[in-house]
Image (spheres, helix red, strand yellow):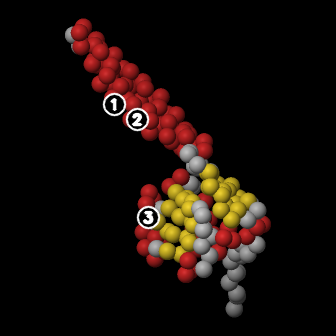
């Protein structure tokens, strides 16, 4: 009879974990490609409309093309900004959450609530006395998502974890 190998779990103290997670490069690549693609398409579309419009209505062709191009350009730029700024860092007992607009740092040993949210393809909200941080799982690779879910599920008591059954059913 052979014994099954036991899974080796990360049982190192919280302060020894060193890990940085960032969105994959596909966010940057897709953002740049979409920005170029839609710029070329709408430039051609606008030029064709400008040629066929009466001379006194050429300005409206520019405005119409701009109205359709601008949302696509903003979405593409947002994707590039996500790739550049979003990061989750575990370093010397602290959790550093960096987003496009803010940076938050929480001490891992002081986290009081881990809330599992279904918002935006899954989100982990961590809270202590003064700070609330959010980790949007959509921005990370499947390997990093799984690591984050396992980390927070295994490290913190089940009593402080909110909404886990629904999160597990729908996301995990």
Per the model, the C-alpha gap separating discs 1 and 3 is: 31 Å
**Residue 45 sits in quarter:** top left
Any part of residue 58 in sight = yes
Residue placed furthest toward the left: 54
Q: Distance between the residues labelled 3 and 2?
A: 26 Å
Q: Position of residue 60 (x, y in %)?
A: 27, 19
The residue identified by callout 3 is 118
Question: In the displayed structure, does residue 108 sit left or right of residue 61?
Answer: right
Question: Element at badge 3?
Answer: loop
Check whether the beta carbons of the residues at disc 1 and disc 2 lie within 8 A of each other: yes
Quadrant (top left, top right, bottom left, bottom right) of the N terminus: bottom right
First in sequence: mark 3 or mark 2?
2
**Residue position marked by numbered label 2 in the rendering:** 72
Q: Do the residues labelled 3 and 2 touch (CB within 8 Å)?
A: no
Q: Position of residue 151 (x, y in %)?
A: 63, 69
Q: In this rendered view, identify the residue nearer to me: 20 or 6.
A: 20
Residue visible at 78% across and 66% down in the picture: 16
Q: Where is residue 127 in the image (x, y as percent from the top left)?
A: 57, 67
Q: Whole-Å distance between the Cαs marked 1 and 2?
A: 7 Å
Q: How crowded is mark 3: few (under 14 residues within 10 Å), some or many (20 or more)?
A: some
Which residue is disc 1 drawn over? 68
Q: Nearer the viewer, residue 118 or 172?
A: 118
């Amino acid at each position: 009879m052979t014994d099954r190998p036991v899974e080796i779990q990360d049982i190192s103290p919280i302060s020894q974990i060193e890990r940085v997670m960032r969105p994959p490069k596909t966010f940057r690549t897709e953002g740049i490609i979409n920005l170029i693609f839609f710029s070329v398409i709408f430039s051609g579309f606008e030029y064709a409309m400008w040629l066929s419009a009466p001379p006194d209505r050429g300005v409206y062709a520019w405005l119409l093309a701009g109205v359709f191009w601008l949302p696509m350009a903003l979405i593409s730029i947002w994707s590039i900004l996500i790739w550049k700024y979003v990061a989750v860092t575990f370093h010397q007992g602290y959790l550093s959450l960096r987003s496009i607009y803010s940076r938050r740092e929480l001490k891992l040993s002081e986290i009081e609530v881990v809330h599992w949210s279904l918002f935006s393809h899954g989100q982990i909200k961590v809270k202590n006395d003064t700070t609330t941080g959010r980790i949007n799982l959509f921005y990370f690779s499947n390997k990093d998502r799984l690591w984050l879910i396992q980390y927070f599920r295994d490290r913190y008591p089940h009593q402080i974890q909110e909404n886990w059954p629904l999160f597990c059913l729908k996301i995990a």
